[in-house]
Image: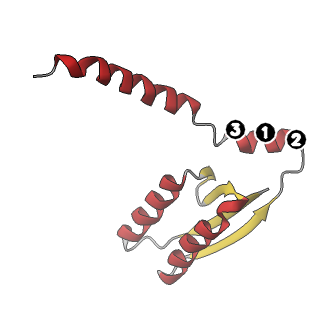
Amino acid sequence: MFTLLLVTLPTQPSAVRLRIWRALKSLGCAALRDGAYVLPEPQTALLEEIANEALQHGGTAQVLGLTPRSSAQQQDLQAQFDRSAAYAEWLQGQRTLLQALPQLP
């Protein structure tokens, strides 16, 4: 099961929008569309914190349970959290750096 955050933020102050967007990104949320973010259910409390911040700044926010209706939907949602390509890219960068270290002054 997953948790869905539906959030709408006021246009001002933009710092709040940026802070919430960064928090969602740092949590690894899957963005289903603008204002709709998903995390696995064990992270519900983290989305509730973000929802509370949005409400404090005049936005709207709802944290809802999300249960896929089929195994295909379950797989699609789980695929949103697959970071293997990004990890492979990071790992290659690390290998390149390690190879270059002995040659640095």
Is residue 93 rendered to the left or right of residue 38? left
Residue 48 versus residue 37: which sits nearer the camera? 48
Q: Which residue is mark 2?
A: 71
Is residue 26 rendered to the left or right of residue 2? left
Q: Say which amino acid is labelled 1.
A: Gln
Please tell me whether residue 70 is drawn above or below residue 37 in the rendered image.
above
Q: Which residue is mark 3?
A: 79
Is residue 52 rendered to the left or right of residue 79? left
Structural crowding at the residue carrying mark 1, measured as other residues with C-alpha within 10 Å and reported as few (<14), some (14–19) or many (≥20): few
Query: Dot 3: what SS?
Result: helix
Residue 105 in the image: x percent, y percent? 9, 22
Residue 41 in the image: x percent, y percent? 72, 60
User: Is the C-beta separation of discs 1 and 3 under 8 Å?
Assistant: yes
Cα distance between the residues tagged 1 and 3: 6 Å
Q: Identify the image quadrant of residue 65.
A: bottom right
Structural crowding at the residue carrying mark 2, measured as other residues with C-alpha within 10 Å and reported as few (<14), some (14–19) or many (≥20): few
Structural crowding at the residue carrying mark 3, measured as other residues with C-alpha within 10 Å and reported as few (<14), some (14–19) or many (≥20): few
Q: Say which amino acid is labelled 2.
A: Ser
Q: Which residue is mark 1?
A: 75
Residue visible at 50% across and 83% down? 56
Is residue 1 rendered to the left or right of residue 100? right
Residue visible at 50% across and 76% down? 53
Please tell me whether residue 12 is drawn above or below residue 75 in the rendered image.
below
Residue 31 in the image: x percent, y percent? 60, 51
User: Is the C-beta separation of discs 1 and 2 under 8 Å?
Assistant: yes
Residue 71 in the image: x percent, y percent? 88, 41
Query: Dot 1: what SS?
Result: helix
Q: Say which amino acid is labelled 3.
A: Ala
Cα distance between the residues tagged 2 and 3: 12 Å
- First-in-chain label (2 vs 3): 2
Q: Identify the image quadrant of residue 18.
A: bottom left
